[in-house]
Image (cartoon, coloured by chain):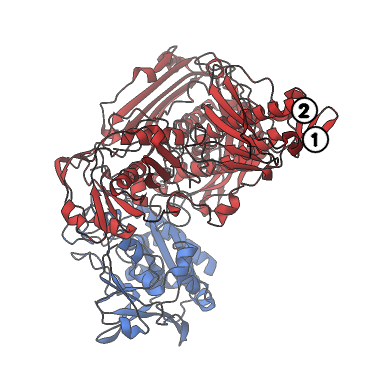
Chain colours: A red, B blue
Amino acid sequence: MSNPIEVTLTHRMNLPDEENLLDRMAQGVVSTPMDRPEGPLKVSGTATYADEDHPPGTAYGWFVRAAITSGRVTGLNTRELEAMPGVLAVIRDNRMIRNPAQGGDAKSPHQGPSEVFYKGQPIALVVAETFEQARDAALAARPDYKDRSDRAVILPTRTDYEKPRSKQSSQGNLDKAMRNAAFAVDVEYDTPSMSHAAMEPHAAVAWWQDGRLTVRGSYQMLNSNAQELADALGISVKKVRILSRYVGGGFGSKLGIGHEGVGAAIAAQKLDRPVAIALHRRQVFEATHRRSETRQRVRLCCDADGRMTGIGHEAWVSNLPGETFSEPVTQATPFTWAGENREIGHYIGRLNLTGAGSMRAPGEAVGVPITDAAMDELAEAAGIDPVEFRLRNIPEADPSSGKPFSSNRLADCIRIGAERFGWSGRPKVPGSRREGEWLIGFGMSGVIRVNMLGDSTARVTLRPDGTALVETDMTDIGTGSYSVLTQIAAEMLGLPPDRVTTVLGDSDLPPSIGSGGSRGAASSGSSVMLAARAVRGKLAERMGCDEEDLTLKDGTAIAGNRQRDLADVLAGDILQGTGTIKRGAAEAHHRQSSWGAEFCEVAVSSVTGEVHVRRLSGVFAAGRILNAKTARSQCMGGMIFGIGQALHEEVFHDARDGSFMNRDLAEYHVPANLDVPHIDIELLMDDRDPYANPMQAKGIGELALCGTAAAIVNAIANATGHRFRSFPITLDKVLEKLG
Amino acid sequence: MRAFDYARAQTPADAIGTDARIIAGGTNLLDLMKLQVETPERLIDINHVGLDQVERDGDGLRIGALVRNSDLAAHPAVRQDWPLLSRALLAGASPQLRNRASTGGNLMQRTRCYYFYDLDAPCNKRVPGSGCGAIGGVNRIHAILGASEHCIATYPGDMAVALSALDAVVEVEGPDGRREIPATAFHRLPGDRPDLDNELQPGEMILSVRLPAPLGGRQIYRKVRDRRSYAFALVSVAAAVTMQGGRMDRVRLAFGGVAHKPWRVPAAEQMLAGQAPSAELFDRAAAAVLEGARGQGHNDFKIPLLRRTLAAVLAEAVQESA
């Protein structure tokens, strides 16, 4: 076959998109509820995840955990372990990391195996011929410690918080506004330490060939993961390849390179054979990342008409010493609701506790439900219906910066959602509706998640037979990347989707932003669109027309009254487009966010305090919806995540030493099937956001989570007449107030 | 998991009197072995010895030790005459686990105490003399009744709570022959030997569980937990109540999630028998059940929770059977 004819197209998102190209294409594939191309592999168990395919000769690794809260490791019974059956090596290497890299860091938290910062930190790696032998030997490890401390200082008892100047802000005079307000609330809420609890445990298989490392792992952001791994090992990024074809859930826990990737690479190098490491569920809980616990103080005030005059939001969070990430709790507070007097505080406590990192919708996931629950309290104080109260307080422009919104459909979502849900049937008096022992209540919440773009590149190859290949290092963490990227290329090139093959999850492919921060589909999708557009340009040349006059549909090219089969136009040539989207000024001049509203009906047992979610309904606006089915699934997943946040999820730290006590899925509770009612979802399919990217699509992967817990806790307040300010709302907390 | 020897028993006699650890469904033992909480040197697999039938035994029922939880819960005789047992079984675990778990194994399941599972934490049940991490630690799921200074763990199962209320009998055989242990006495309190969960002696094997004649009346199993399925009981109440002339006649009550064994208080049952139901009486019965109850901090709520749940269950039982 001949060499491809290459063409590139790079677009920097400086100006709003005026072409709205996808709406002008003819294939009609984008936005449809297309099934996942890889779906049959997944449901038949034949999609190979990271630890499901081991090269011949693979050895197996298992980490030794630190059993102290802080101190130094001075020795280990290495000789004894090495003598155990099948043991190949006991590795304590200075290139080992303390904790996984944070998303997008592109550097690794170098540490070495000697200094201990948290209980459960990996301090050695045992490699053996079999998985069972490695585990057996690792459990026989007896580390010697020095300067040992078994005490952790957990968040509520700390006083010495860092207050980074860049994370505090103030405008007007909130104290004065609170004093002069007709109605005001000043409340404290808390949320617990949480764990991502993705179904697939973290795993990596590493091998070296001709000085180059390949790691098959479970990661979300391959371009930065390759850099992080290279940084940890002290080698050039060119010497590293990461493969993550399928990822069994990430939720942020696989954003950065982790112990398993670095450990497998070091061991494979030392032993000169492939090494696989799959973390045990208990290690996933304590040796990856968690979402920080938060304490939040919210001050809100309004005038007699329920128009808000002030918002204060302060958050106390934690992380390991030296980590730059801190849960950005207040991220949506500056722009969501009106009020000219504003104060934001962000305080970080340093703890010897498993590191905190990004977990699905870092910031809004825990910030929005709290400000929204406080809004509900203020609406009640003001005697105004919660829906009406929120509608009165949607600002015209970002009240902190004065920037206009790129698009703001919050009011539409609230109105449509109220109608769908039957909000008018809400019990007017809290605690007034009863069915047997069950107290019934309705609640609602605004749903907000900032929208972001990340630099991304993709390659689209149109082959002589009129089939296309899409390639980028983007990952599919269960979100539907394979689906939407296939659809975008099919739409742009006028091909039925089964003539497009999408290959992802290989760091040797053109770099994308990866999966994180709800940026993946819009960013990598835009790069696919640009790559395909470059190919369209070449086809237009061959058809003798301008690109805008070219129609591609069902494998044919149409210009004016001429219609030709694509294979005929290609005449044996391969056309290869490389498209790149880059962040630009559009995001600097306009405030971008995805929006939604959720409505909930709960039943609370007056006997046991158990809370059952009976109905959950959501309306969402996220610009163009790329696939109605995967988008709906993302929203459903977010809402279920939110049920867990409201009612179930909590890491139990032993207050004496910080230990994660409930480190398995039997005792760390996420919602089970019975906890999830029918979930009703409407997507605003007509929404477009020209400032977001050329597809006019925004992030949806995390959106639906950012408010669910408030809809639930507000419904509990309506059912019981009591406000609950400590998450999760477990039955003991309810019982305490029911009396 | 430590390396171990494995043998398959063809008959119960192959397993009785050996020092091998018996494995049936393995739903609990395998997990504990992987974590090295349990490190048996020898396993003997009894899945092929029979003992997998449910048979009539006079007015009662004899349940083979290897009858799976799913099959037992679905058995027509159990559903008809001992519905409490069926409901308790279905409140436990998940369908996949119930398909695998056996009647005998369910009785033998070990505590879910976090410290028992954590090899680096002190636990007198796992390592006698090492201390109890749960006292002063995270103890939301722990015992409020019958605990000791050495152990505050709970027995986590549901089936045994129903068996206790139904006055079932566990039939076991050891090298010295067969004997019967009442379900109410099968599990132990921790005392100063929390390493011993129950009265089964070394070399003994559970052959079957015998249910006496049906109690009749309303039978309710209410399990209160942190999510609606696949969670262990914080408190569970098993109740069987018959009525006669507007008065409670026979009353059987057992409680799960509150002690090292299913909790049964005959005095509370006697207090109710022969009496007309009233909220005040239910409260007094609850007070009798809770005599000596003591919270450990995180689990203090179990005391009012048990009281409230018992009152609600009794109110339901007397109403529907009237």
Residue A338 picture location, percent across and down: 53, 19
Callout 1: SS = strand
Looking at the image, which is closer to me, B217 or A12?
Answer: A12
Looking at the image, which is closer to me, A130 or B303?
Answer: A130
Q: Earlier in the sequence, mark 1 or mark 2?
A: 2
Residue at the right extreme, as displayed = A561
Label disc, if present, on residue A21 of the rendered structure = none
Q: Residue at x 84, y 31 (%)?
A: A562
Amino acid, disc 1: Arg
Amino acid, disc 2: Met
Location of residue B51 by image quarter: bottom left
* Marked residue chain, label 1: A
Residue A589 picture location, percent across and down: 55, 15
> Is residue B257 left or right of A519 when viewed as pictured?
left
> Is residue A703 left or right of A276 when viewed as pictured?
right
Task: Please determine whether, in this image, residue B299 is positioned above or below residue A113.
Answer: below
Location of residue B235 by image quarter: bottom left
**Is disc 2 on the same chain as disc 1?**
yes
Dot 2, how many residues are within 10 Å of its Cα: few (below 14), some (14-19), or many (20+)?
many
> Which quadrant would the N terminus of chain A be assigned to in this image?
top right
Dot 1, how many residues are within 10 Å of its Cα: few (below 14), some (14-19), or many (20+)?
some
Residue A364 picture location, percent across and down: 47, 31
Callout 2: SS = helix
Q: Find disc 2 in the rendering and name its residue.
A: A543
Q: CA distance from mark 1 to mark 2?
A: 9 Å
Asked whether the viewer can see residue A697, the reply is: no
Task: Please determine whether, in this image, residue B217 is positioned above or below residue A374.
Answer: below
Location of residue A290 by image quarter: top left
* Marked residue chain, label 2: A
Label disc, if present, on residue A564 of the rendered structure = 1
Q: Residue at x 45, y 36 (%)?
A: A222
Q: Do the numbered discs 1 and 2 sit on residues whose CB atoms are within 8 Å?
A: yes
